[in-house]
Amino acid sequence: MTTTRPTDPLRAEHDGLRPHVDRLRDLGDQAVQGGDMMEPLQASVEFLHHHLLVHATAEEAVLYPLVADVLGAPRATATMSEDHARIKVLAAELADVDADDRRSIARVAYGLHTLITLHLEKEEKVYLPLLDASLSHDAVAAMYQRMEDAAATALGHG
């Protein structure tokens, strides 16, 4: 029998983000090595603005307040919110960079890859086990539904 954790849906969502996050590293590599940058640059910007930042908005609205409540510390997630703020700045920078500015593309893409990878690991190693230990499957399922609703609203679908 396989034991499921209440936060497995969120872990699965993170697993779905990882290949796109890894493409940011690939984008940096491609910028260094040469080749046409327009398509991979546009694909990365699209992912950041229409998927990753939407996910971050949902976390800010739902996940982080719940973690803060479980910990009994309103600012417990402030450093993670700062990660989101920096990711947003770098995503905007990547969207504005000239496709011929390979050095800037590499710098921003590598920075985003590192920051997002570390951010996901922190959530999965610290916050999600805390929620697994503190909340029922139903409570986490309700949280996940609220996150999906917040994401839909962020996309203009809610």
Image (cartoon, rainbow, N blue to C red):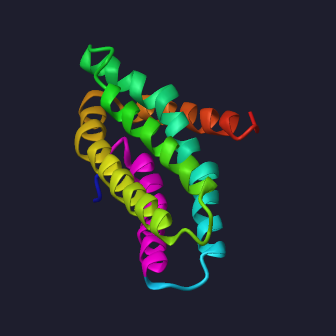
Residue drawn where x is 37% and y is 43% of the image: 7
| Location of residue 134 in the rendering, given as x and y in whole percent from the top left corner | 27, 27
**Which quadrant would residue 25 be assigned to in this image?**
bottom left
- The picture places residue 38, in percent across and down from the top left corner, at 65, 73
Any part of residue 4 in sight? no
Verify whether residue 29 appears in magenta.
yes
Decide: is 3 above or below 84: below
Horizontal relation, residue 118 to residue 33: left or right: left
Quadrant location of the C terminus? top right
- In percent of width and height, residue 10 lies at 43, 46
* Count of picture labels: 0
* Residue nearest the viewer, comparing 112 with 148: 112
Residue for point 34% across, 17% down: 69
Which one is nearer the viewer's eye here, 31 or 56?
Answer: 31
Give the vertical position of 74 relative to 110 (above or below).
above
Q: Is residue 42 left or right of residue 101?
A: right
Q: Which residues are magenta?
A: 5-32
Along the line of sight, the residue nearer the viewer: 49 or 57: 49
Residue at figure coordinates x 28%, y 52% from the top left? 3
